[in-house]
Image (cartoon, rainbow, N blue to C red):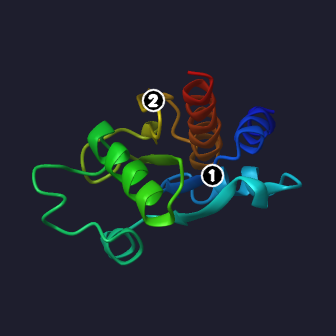
């Protein structure tokens, strides 16, 4: 499982991770926290599902969002950077998207997600599953976010 590889690398380096997820609904954090010894690398995470959560938990204001919309690579990068900063982690991981069964209010189809890693090496990725099943997309978003983080950790 990819989360075991992520955990092993983070723990071996003594590095910490913070997570901001939206459409994945906590599945990224859940997969990491299910591992024994997660406290060695996991600082915390938040489900940033609304503008209220974005501002209240990450301090991202309307001014920070000027010219940007959710469900984009730029927004995912902002989330990853901000959760990393707020929790004092070496790495930040973020996901934002549309799980389904329909698209989001920004015009993205179900199965669209943007993922980002902030840290010593940053990465962004846009994913389109082509699926409308909510649970399937949530699981896929979490899996691909962890795979993106693993790629960044491996450099």
From the top left corner, tell me how far across and down residue 100 is, in percent. 48, 48
State the residue position of label 2: 127
Q: How crowded is mark 2: few (under 14 residues within 10 Å), some or many (20 or more)?
A: some
- Inspect this view and state whether residue 142 appears: yes
Q: Which of 127 and 150 lies nearest the eye of the viewer?
A: 150
Q: Image quadrant of residue 48?
A: bottom left
Quadrant housing the C terminus? top right
Residue that extends furthest to the top in the rendered view of this protein: 155
- Inspect this view and state whether residue 99 appears: no
Q: What element carries label 2?
A: strand
Q: Which of 120 and 142 lies nearest the eye of the viewer?
A: 120
Drawn side of residue 85 relative to residue 52, left or right: right
From the top left corner, tell me how far across and down residue 91 is, in percent. 53, 46
Drawn side of residue 15 relative to residue 74, left or right: right
Q: How crowded is mark 1: few (under 14 residues within 10 Å), some or many (20 or more)?
A: many
Q: Image quadrant of residue 65?
A: bottom left
Q: What element carries label 1?
A: loop
Q: Residue sitting at 32 percent across and 50 percent down? A: 78
Q: Residue sitting at 53 percent across and 65 percent down? A: 46
Quadrant housing the N terminus? top right
Point out the tag, 2 or 1, that comes first from the N-terminus. Answer: 1
From the top left corner, tell me how far across and down residue 38 is, in percent. 79, 56
State the residue position of label 1: 16
Residue that extends furthest to the front in the rendered view of this protein: 14
- Report if the CB atoms under discs 2 and 1 are less than 8 Å apart: no
Q: Residue sitting at 39 percent across and 73 percent down? A: 53
Above or below, 100 against 63 in this view is: above
The alpha-carbon separation of the residues under discs 2 and 1 comes to: 25 Å
């Amino acid at each position: 499982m990819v989360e075991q590889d992520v955990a092993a690398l983070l723990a071996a380096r003594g590095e910490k991770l913070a997570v901001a997820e939206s459409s994945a609904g906590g599945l990224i954090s859940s997969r990491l926290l299910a591992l024994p010894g997660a406290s060695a690398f996991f600082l915390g995470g938040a489900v940033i599902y609304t503008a209220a959560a974005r501002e209240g938990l990450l301090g991202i204001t309307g001014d920070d969002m000027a010219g940007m919309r959710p469900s984009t690579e730029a927004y995912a990068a902002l989330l990853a950077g901000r959760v990393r900063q707020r929790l004092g982690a070496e790495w930040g991981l973020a996901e934002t998207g549309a799980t389904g069964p329909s698209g989001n209010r920004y015009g993205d189809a179900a199965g669209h997600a943007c993922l980002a890693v902030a840290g010593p090496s940053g990465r962004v990725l846009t994913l389109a599953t082509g699926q409308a099943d909510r649970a399937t997309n949530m699981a896929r978003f979490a899996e691909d976010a962890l795979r993106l983080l693993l790629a960044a950790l491996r450099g």
